[in-house]
Amino acid sequence: MSRPGLVIGGYTPDTEGSGPGLTVARPHADGRLEAVAETTASGPSFVVAHPRLPLLYAVLERAADGGLAVFADDPGDAAPRLLAEHPSGGSLPCHLALDPEGGWLAIANYGDGTVTAYRLGADGMPEPGPLTFPHEGRGPHPDRQEGPHAHQAVFGPGGVLYVTDLGTDEMRRFLPGMRPHPDGPVRLASGSGPRHFLHHDGHWYVTGELDGTVRVYDGEWREAGVVRASGAEGDNLPAHIALSADGRHLYVTNRGPDTVSVFEVDGPRLTMAAEVPSGGSWPRHFAIDGDRLYVANQRSDSVAVLALKDGLPGPAEQALEVGTPSCVLIR
């Protein structure tokens, strides 16, 4: 039998959730997901894999003492094994990223906006003395933008680290070696609340959690286009964004309408191609694996499976029960 292919992270009872920590699931040919193992951890809300070594890293989204967990992910073990925990350098860490060489690990702490960077040793373990980068500022939304809220960290072209700050409507930038960019952060649309983003073919695509949009920026960070993330009426808080392998389709999860939107991509131009139910409530992160899209529906305690045909998702076929899932990693 093949090795299980998904690791699902989420919230646990001590972080206002109901999940076990990490859940390992095996996808079957008929689309069904089978949970095969669990690893206890405290609120591992986002999980990434080392580019070469059998290691996983997760933020532990705790309010008082946010953490970073390192897990062994050996092929012979059914479930990841906790190796170490380290401070996240801030409160409520919600995202982390590794550079392509596996030399640096960056953490976005939502609670206080601090960005933390650990240098990784040859064995993939965080070295002592992490760098921490606090921030300040606010945005026009009184409830959500009272201060900085770092939300997603991504290593982009040239090894530059980009971090969205939902609280200050900025894209923060760090040059290789974790040196703050001399020109400072980039100002994005006021009140948009930038959450998740990606770079493709010279353009940046950014979800606005607070204004329900997807905005497109060119290589100089000039706004080149904007669309509503959902065609549904009412409030929408877009969450994750990802691109199909061929670059033709852009996918966005919508919390509120509880849908997945699909846009055809033509440079800065985005055209809505489909919007389908997410198969649950409050879709957060999702992952694409071949002709399947796996959606973590946080409030319905499930990971839904949507089949893709010509890049477009059909109705949810299956759902795996998992307490308050927030992240799906294909490994």
Image: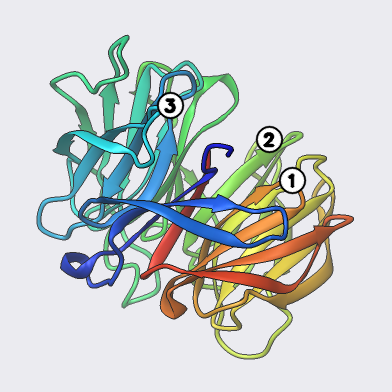
Q: Are marks 1 and 3 in contact (CB under 8 Å)?
A: no
Nearest to N terminus: mark 2 or mark 3: 3
Q: Which residue is mark 1?
A: 290
Residue drawn where x is 24% and y is 58% of the image: 111
Q: Is residue 180 left or right of residue 111?
A: right
Name the secondary structure under disc 1.
loop
Amino acid type, callout 1 = Gly
The x, y position of residue 272, in whole percent, is 82, 68
- Identify the amino acid type marked 2: Gly
Q: Which residue is mark 2?
A: 219
Regarding residue 47, the answer to whether it shows in the image is yes
State the residue at coordinates (21%, 66%).
15
Between residue 279 and residue 34, name the one nearer to us. 34
Residue at the outermost top position? 122
In the image: residue 13, left or right of residue 104: left
- Spatial CA span between label 1 and label 3: 21 Å
